[in-house]
Amino acid sequence: MPIFMIILVALVQGVTEFLPISSSGHLVLIPVLTDQPYQGRTIDVAAHVGTFFAVLFFLRADITRIIIGILSFGKHNPNDARFGLMLMAATIPVIGAGFYVNYANWNWLTMIETLAWSNLLFAMLLWGADRYGVALKNMDDVRFSSAIFIGLTQICALIPGASRSGVTMTAARMLGFDRITAARFSLLLSLPTIAGAGILKTHDLIKDGDLALGSDAALVALLSGLMAFLAMRAMMAWLARANFNIFVYYRLILGAVLLWAIQNHMIA
């Protein structure tokens, strides 16, 4: 795999995984825009491994408290144990849907036109939720009902361009959570989701005898993790003083440009 493709895949995966702009949608565009073949499932798994460990490190304090709470069966840090159970419960719907979609082989999920329209639609939903949603709740106000609702919206993220981070942050803002809480909960919710997707892809690789983790995969994992960590820091710093509009504008422009390119037969 050419070194520039390794850097590009790692950069795209790392930067877009946790921002509300759709990582899968951007990865779909790489072969189209570079005229290079699909990077392969092994590279996909490596990129997911890198981003998984990046969010583990970024939220290490929260995750440590949750693990201690669960392992003590709620005797220590009962609220953290309960929060961990909420995260697991909220992940069940998207894991089930993900298994189904993975083996259903729906071609429309990789269509660039689908990516373009979903970027436009979900950008407007994020704008509306952030513009008109109140910001009265924080992490202490997360309940099972709100966690399940936010978790259910992750199913929409199986559509390229929808963005798992985007739909979960949109849902959290709709429920009245402040921007930082919406982003933090989305990041925490990403852990079981990324782990589930990684396990599914690894299982397919092993089944097909296609798992060959070499230097390319290791470099992608390392660079993806580094870029994801920097992107998370930048996003949280931005949301502490501003709104989601910068992400909304980017997605609207991306969707419009893609539709224009399709209309002019520049991409299919």
Image: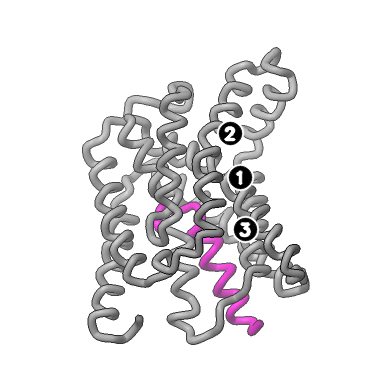
Q: CA distance from mark 1 to mark 3?
A: 15 Å
Cα distance, mark 2 to mark 3? Answer: 19 Å
Viewer-side residue, 78 vs 234: 78
Mark 1 or mark 2, which has the lower sequence index?
A: 1
Q: Are marks 2 and 3 in contact (CB under 8 Å)?
A: no
Q: How many marks?
A: 3
Tell me the number on the disc at residue 27: none
Residue 249 in percent (x, y) is at 28, 59
187 relative to 228, above or below: above
Horizontal arrangement in the rendering, residue 186 relative to residue 217 (left or right): left
Question: Is residue 228 magenta-colored?
Answer: no
User: Mark 1 — residue?
Assistant: 58
Q: Residues within 10 Å of mark 3 (few under 14, many from 20)?
A: many
Magenta span main SS: helix
Q: Tell me how far mark 1 sits from mark 2, CA to CA.
A: 19 Å
Identify which residue is drawn at 69% across, 15% down. Answer: 76
Percent of width and height locating residue 192: 60, 42
Label 2, secondary structure: give it.
helix
Is 117 in front, or is 30?
Answer: 117
Residue that appears at 46% across and 38% down: 151
Task: Give the position of the N terminus as an image quadrant.
Answer: bottom right
Q: Mark 3 highlights which residue?
A: 48
- Provide the residue span drawn in magenta: 1-21
Disc 1: CA contacts within 10 A as few (<14), some (14-19) or many (>=20):
some
Which residue does the image show at 46% across and 30% down from the upper left? Answer: 147
Residue identified by numbered label 2:
88
Q: Residues within 10 Å of mark 2 (few under 14, many from 20)?
A: some
Type of amino acid under label 3: His
Q: Are marks 1 and 2 in contact (CB under 8 Å)?
A: no
Tell us which disc is closer to us: 1 or 3. 3
Q: Are marks 1 and 3 in contact (CB under 8 Å)?
A: no
